[in-house]
Image (cartoon, rainbow, N blue to C red):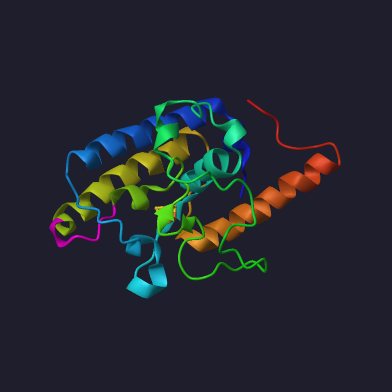
Amino acid sequence: MDLKPAFQEEFLLAMASLYRRVDVDIAGRQGVCIASGRCCRFEEYGHRLYVTQAELIYFYAVSLRPELDPAKNNSEAHTAVLPRTAGFPLPLYNGDGEFAPGCPWQVQGMCSARSGRPLGCRIYFCDSGSRGWQGPVYEYWHQQITDMHVEFDIGYSYLEWRNGLALLRRAEDQITDSAMVGGGPAAG
Ligand code: SF4
């Protein structure tokens, strides 16, 4: 995975803007969240979260390298329930390339990575009243993110969340390794 877009402010601002529009859209649909945490315990509740490469790269910048986030001091910061978990290892990361069941960013039933969380996390509600609109709304915004891959020359892939995190971790290791020999991705 090429993490170069994570260092491009234009990409980060475009993704932040898109997610803001997603959040406004979803807020207007009034899905019911009872904070059960079940949306993030995939195995327990028999569902999976899939993400695109652009979402992973944005997540990397905002949740793992918050110093890259051009909006880190914006109004969204106060919505964080728990401190951001910056960098690996994560609470549920096993250290062997595998993640324990559920999302490693769920801490005490809450999301500790709200700013950078992927599209599926923003759209999914477990209440039955939300089932009718979720599919079409997801498809619409997923297409907007797909278009962003073209705009920012990012290879498109769509993969299971923990698999994506494992790829992200390997890509981060490469950055760290290249930085140690004086390389590292160019900013801008
Ligand atoms: S990123 Fe947050 S909302 Fe999404 S699955 Fe993980 S804990 Fe849940």
Assign the magenta stretch its main secondary structure.
loop
Residue placed most toward the observer, 79 or 168:
79
- On screen, residue 94 versus residue 34, left or right, reads right
Q: Is residue 112 visible?
A: yes
Name of the residue lying farthest toward the right:
181
Q: What residue is rendered at 50% in x and 31% in y?
A: 11
35 vs 150: above or below: below
Report whether 2 appears left or right of 182: left
The answer to which quarter of the image holds residue 28 is top left
In percent of width and height, residue 166 lies at 59, 60
Which quarter holds ligand 1?
A: bottom left
Locate residue 115 relative to residue 188 in the image: left or right: left
**122 is higher (above) or lower (below) than 18:** below
Visible in this render: residue 154?
Answer: no
Taking the spot 34% from the left edge, 39% from the top edge, the residue there is 144
Which quadrant of the structure image shows residue 9?
top right
On the rendered image, what quadrant is the C terminus found in?
top right
In the rendered image, residue 71, in percent from the top left (x then y), is placed at 48, 27
Residue 179 pos. (x, y %): 79, 40
Residue found at x 46% / y 45%: 55
5 in relation to 166, above or below:
above
Residue 42 location (% of width, % of height): 39, 68
Residue at left offset 71%, top offset 36% = 185
For this view, does 17 lie left or right of residue 68?
Answer: left
User: What are the residue bounds of the magenta stretch?
Assistant: 124-129
Quick check: is 63 in the magenta stretch? Answer: no
* Number of marks: 0
Pick whichever, 3 or 44, lies toward us.
44
Asked if the magenta segment contains residue 125, the reply would be yes
On the image, which quarter does residue 37 sit in? Answer: bottom left
